[in-house]
Amino acid sequence: MSESNEPISHFIRNRVDADQDQGTYGGKVTTRFPPEPNGYLHFGHAKSIFLNFGLARDYNGICHLRFDDTNPVKEEQAYVDAIREDIDWLGFRDPAHEHFASDYFETLYQGAVSLVKAGLAYVDSQSADEMRANRGTLKEPGTNSPYRERSIEENLDLFTRMRAGEFPDGEHILRAKIDMASPNLNMRDPAIYRIRHAHHHRTGDDWPIYPMYDYAHCVSDAIEGVTHSLCTLEFEDHRPLYDWFIAKLADLGFFERPLPQQIEFSRLNLTYMPLSKRKLIQLVEGGHVDGWDDPRMPTLKGARRRGFTPAGFKLFTDRIGVSKSDSLIDFGVLEDCMRETLNESAERRIGVLDPLKLVLVNFPEDHEETCYAPNHPQKPDWGKREVKLTRELWIERGDFALDPPKKYFRLKPDGEVRLRYGFIIKHVGHDVDEDGQVTCVYAEYDPDTKSGTPGADARKVKGNIHWLSARDAVETEIRQYDRLFNVPAPGARREGDEPDVERDFLDDINPDSIHTLTAYIEAGAANAEPESIYQFERHGYFVADQKEHAPGQRPVFNRAVTLRDSWGQGK
Ligand code: ATP
Ligand code: MG
């Protein structure tokens, strides 16, 4: 995996390199990751986290975690804690560089006062409807507000009284005085502050006015000395405004130059997975999933419970790269990355997911044989563990066929197969119930064929199946997850749809995305700590559930991914 070590070059890295060469920021690289604490982080945020924290790490710089908490009604402390945890989990958090946009409320306010004093901002008293009507359209220029030419004194008086809480919500608004005829709508006298008598999770009732995102974000970047402010493409048209605010404030002596630069990249979109908070909230609130950390959710909390790993996300973000073109990445690419990294990191264990009893008729009742199974087939230094073979075993129902298809190398009537890490066995009989279901298989084992002993390989058989001693295996709940949606683009219109009918993404939910099985696993895995991840041989990667698995109780394992991409081919 060449991806994991060498940083992958992309246009943002090239920009940073150019700044380094030219000494734009005196060799400094400071980025920031600015989540709004109003929801849980999702796979899209992982891309942004690896980009921002990763760049800072690669250039010996700093990445600030800045909670973008300028919107008072929606934010909650619980989200702040959850976001910290997720960034920790990905391996990045640095508490020394954690900030809250709300810490800058006073500076942001003073900046706005300076803009007013410089004649660069004014208090508008139009209604919201009037403002909307006067904004113009993409084709039509806007119309100046009748309040646009208020004197600096009047503006200062009104803005000070807005801050003092004298006016109700919506009565006035502070706007930048730029250009109502600008072809860029963002430059048509955008709002800087609005009145909002709302309680804030950190500043309480101190502020009856709150800064708008476009103002608060660039000013926070400048306050923190951010050099490269990376955001998704939809902010491209906001860049002139980003630059305008900080340039004007720098002219007024608020900041030193050089100023931060905004660079846009394309957001991550995945097939089968909506990545928008608005939609994820609907999934949770509508009861379509079992909370934000449901293993089927594209949240980092869900991913963790699913057995997805930080290493897998790292490989994924390297593999998809960073560009400016919109892209839709197949969910299978993410699963592949999890599979590849888990293949490296997960110890092997045995799990029988669809158990069928097998009795070795010539194996004495009270006898046991100790077999040795490698913990990782490509890593001999990870050692081997003991697995006991006894007279009664569990094998996989699919490993025995009464009426086998061609080239079926597993166990069949009168056939032979090797019990992996054990002996060659030969079928001698079976029981069938009234529905024709096999209920028990009988076989003889050949004591001269034990794996790992001299001469054991003298006789070769094609099939090799896994098994567990019925005496030692532990009954386990296994949850196998399928995709949460049936179609690659949930909610998108499809051929044959009525022209005026909108689709609801919730209609595309896969009603059958979770399968719960009663299986058997090795005692060693059954007693593992929550979040331990194993490969159950021939099946896939499974994680001991973070919440419901506890040593000493009935184990609960979630399937992270299968061994191969078998999706869509039936199971
Ligand atoms: P959503 O669109 O789900 O509401 P958001 O952009 O509102 O997400 P924020 O908490 O504001 O969520 O985002 C924090 C950072 O993560 C921002 O810099 C944003 O650009 C980035 N980000 C969010 N979604 C994606 C995505 N799908 N791909 C890449 N980066 C993303
Ligand atoms: Mg946002």
Image: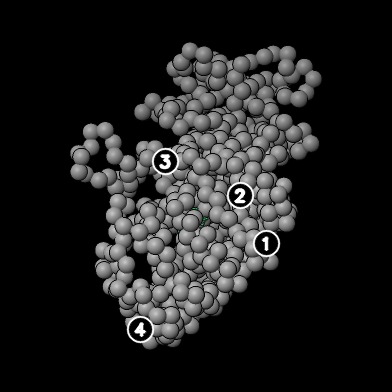
Viewport quadrant of the C terminus: top left
Q: Earlier in the sequence, mark 3 or mark 1?
A: 1
Based on the displayed image, in which of its 4 quarters is residue 129 positioned? bottom left
Cβ atoms under marks 4 and 3 closer than 8 Å: no
Q: Marks 2/1: CA distance?
A: 14 Å
Is 510 or 170 nearer to us in this picture? 170
- Compared to residue 185, the image places residue 71 above or below, namely below
Q: Is residue 257 left or right of residue 36?
A: right
Q: Where is residue 284 in the image (x, y as percent from the top left)?
A: 39, 56
Q: Marks 3/1: CA distance?
A: 33 Å
Q: In this view, does 98 lie to the left or right of 436?
A: right
Q: Is mark 4 on a helix, strand or loop?
A: loop
Badge 2, how many Cα within 10 Å: few under 14, some, many 20+? many
> Which residue matches tag 4?
167
Q: Position of residue 297 (x, y in %)?
A: 46, 50
The label shown at residue 204 is none
Badge 1, how many Cα within 10 Å: few under 14, some, many 20+? some
For badge 1, the amino acid type reads Asp
> Which residue matches tag 2?
50
Name the residue located 29 percent from the left edge and 47 percent from the top edge.
Answer: 504
* Pointer 2 residue Cβ closer than 8 Å to ligand 1: no
Residue depth check, mark 2 versus mark 3: number of the one nearer the observer: 2
Based on the displayed image, in which of its 4 quarters is residue 501 positioned? top left
> Which residue matches tag 1?
94
Q: Is mark 1 on a helix, strand or loop?
A: loop
For badge 2, the amino acid type reads Phe
Name the residue located 54 percent from the left edge and 20 percent from the top edge.
Answer: 411
The label shown at residue 272 is 3
Residue 418 seen in the figure: yes
Residue depth check, mark 4 versus mark 3: number of the one nearer the observer: 4
Q: Earlier in the sequence, mark 2 or mark 1?
A: 2
Cβ atoms under marks 3 and 1 closer than 8 Å: no
